[in-house]
Amino acid sequence: MAVGPFDSSIYRMLLRDEEVAACFDDAAQIESWLKVESALAKAQAGIGLLPADAAAAIEQACKTCDIDPARLAARTGRDAIPVPALLALVREKLAAEHADWLHFGATTQDIVDTGLVLRLRAVCDIVDARLRLLLQLLADLADAHAELPMIARTRRMPATPTSFGAVVAAWGAPLLAQIESLAQLRPRLLRVSLAGAAGNAAALGPRSAELRQALARQLDLVVDDLCWHTDRSALLELASCLTRITAALAKFADDCLFAAAPEVGELKLPAEGGSSTMPHKQNPVLAETLLALHEIALSGDAELRRAAVHRQQRDGAAWLLEWHALPQTCLAAGRTLQIGLALLTRIEPNAARMRANLEGVHGLAHAEAISFRLAQQVPRAEARELVKRLCKQAANTDANLVQLVAAEFADVDWQAVVAPEAQLGDAAEQARRFAELARAT
């Protein structure tokens, strides 16, 4: 039985991201730990700290070990860490004179944290590639509809005209920032951990800094001479970045859900979700799932922040909590990007409904434009109060604001004033500027 929906065979088509999940399964963890142990031996041999034949034997043993994760369970249950059990199985494949050199001077946290970093590098690559694809789709959508008028809504109520392209640009702008955040984060995240049992590299000897450099070269990671056993800030940065990605796509999803409601009808979404009893139902499953995944990412992000206080020089409790929260956040972000890509390829704007909703029943969306035009003839405060009065009159008498103001100020070409294209401001420029920036990523 699956503990959570990410691992469930029932829910896997809805919530599971196979690519990201593969970075966190038992096999991937074991592979990453073996890779670090092998690279450590090779790095130690390379600078003369370990016999070359021992390093070759360790490398061969790590490459050929086919470890069943279940064989690590009993000892991990006792030790609360998996590496001692792993080392015992690797040593079974080594001659006695070589076995003593395995894991020489390192501690479990060095192996687990460096292995995690190797797998997080793959996660970052997946996220980065999907983000760039998503931005290209958003760029195309913004560019194609840069001048398509629609009603803007503030505080959930109709406001003034804008363009659908500008709305799309607002969806995509936060993702531009996350591309940059991810790139800036990599040197702080993708770093070797090699500091020994208490973080002072005592067992690694006087050449520990040189050894860290050698290990970093072996694994193509950044070297950091400061121990980060208790410094989890880079992991927090990653979780925050991923959560911001899910937030941007949750906003996109929420806007889509509103715009696709039949009574609004400004967007058409994929109709995939059926009902067990209502034949007419076509539920917006993809958009709903984006909202749920953001909440999951938020929970994981918050849990990681609670786990950020690693007491003294090592902390088993905080570390264990981190192992639970970080994969959930990565899985939620990965699946969010997959769904975002699927949704963006299939949404369709309805220009006719956008125009109809913009005009509305009473033409109130044009109140700002009318007020500013009247301010050319009467004092601004007077113009504002006049338009407020006419808005109330329109709503109470089922009249149209434009017709009411035209009756009092017949010398103005009000149709030109209230033409949506005349009220877009720099909406089209924003859409095209976003498209330009997105395509440049």
Image (cartoon, grey):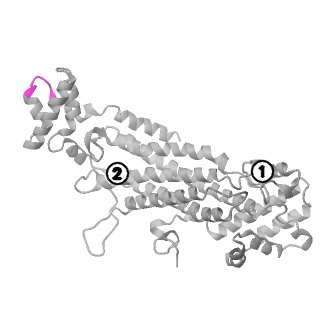
Return the disc, 2 or 1, that comes first in the chain's sequence.
1
Give the main secondary structure, helix, strand or loop, of the magenta stretch.
Answer: loop
Q: Is residue 143 visible?
A: yes
Q: Could you say where residue 27 lies in the image, as x and y percent from the top left?
A: 66, 70
Could you say which quadrant of the image residue 79 lies in?
bottom right
Decide if residue 50 is on the left or right side of residue 437.
right
Q: Which residues are magenta?
A: 408-414
Instruction: Determine which of the numbered discs, if any, sits on residue 255 in the image.
Output: 2
Label pair 2/1, CB-CB below 8 angstroms: no
Decide if residue 57 is on the left or right side of residue 305.
right
Q: Could you say where residue 277 lies in the image, as x and y percent from the top left?
A: 27, 75
The residue drawn where x is 80% and y is 61% is 106
Tell me: residue 380, above or below residue 109. above
Label 2: few (<14), some or many (≥20) within 10 Å? some
| Residue bearing mark 1 | 217
Q: Is residue 68 visible?
A: no
Label 1: few (<14), some or many (≥20) within 10 Å? some
Determine whether the residue tagged by mark 2 lies in a helix, strand or loop: helix
